[in-house]
Amino acid sequence: MPASWIDTLFGHGKDLDALQVSMRAGVLFLIALVLIRIAGMRAFGRKSSFDSVVVIMLGAVLSRPVVGASPFWPTLAGCAVLVILHRVLGMLTARSRLLERLVKGSSRVVYRDGHDDHEQLVRTGISVADLDEVARRHALIPDRRGVREIVVESSGELSVITKDRGA
């Protein structure tokens, strides 16, 4: 039986040539774009652990059918489940503070009014030098003396509130 044009372009199994891997990669790229649009940009913008999980898993799972390590359609179905689960959890955490804390974590104050919170620094893996660096980078001041508060956000980013801002 002669091979169909689909078999010629996309192949099947692990015995794939460069054209077939390239075609699979192109199609999966377009499918990934659709999945990303469904997941929403927050999955790629915030970089919280909640969002990073879907990014890492999508990359890992979508790579498998490119090289023929996993069947195309079942793998795509698994990716759709990941994206939908991420989207649903995102919507649920927007409605429930408790679920949001469980899934996404919460922010922690590591410096306030001239005092480091050493327990929180150790828990978050932030050093005193990191606090001075964030003051220089984000508040554009030489050190923490001009800072009222530094917070480790649930995304892992450091936020700085200077003394001349806010009450």
Image (cartoon, helix red, strand yellow):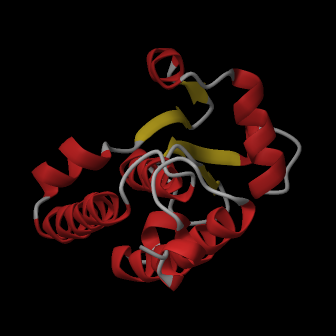
Residue nearer the viewer, 106 or 85: 85
Q: Is residue 139 left or right of residue 156?
A: right
> In the rendering, at what x and y percent does residue 112 appear?
53, 37
Residue nearer the viewer, 64 or 34: 64
| Residue at position x 42%, y 45% in the image | 49
| Residue at position x 47%, y 56% in the image | 65
In the rendered image, the residue lying farthest to the right is 142
Q: Is residue 43 visible?
A: yes
> In the rendering, at what x and y percent does residue 61 appear?
42, 51
Residue 88, located in which quarter of the rendered image? bottom left
Whether residue 133 is situated above or below residue 162 in the rendered picture: above
Q: Is residue 77 left or right of residue 65?
A: left
The quarter of the picture where the N terminus appears is bottom left
> In the rendering, at what x and y percent does residue 36 appear?
45, 75
Whether residue 66 is situated above or below residue 10 in the rendered picture: above
Residue 161, located in which quarter of the rendered image? bottom right
> In the rendering, at what x and y percent does residue 25 appear?
61, 68
| Residue at position x 75%, y 56% in the image | 138
Q: Is residue 101 left or right of residue 39?
A: left
- Tag count: 0
Whether residue 42 is situated above or below residue 110 in the rendered picture: below
| Residue at position x 57%, y 74% in the image | 8
Q: Is residue 167 visible?
A: no
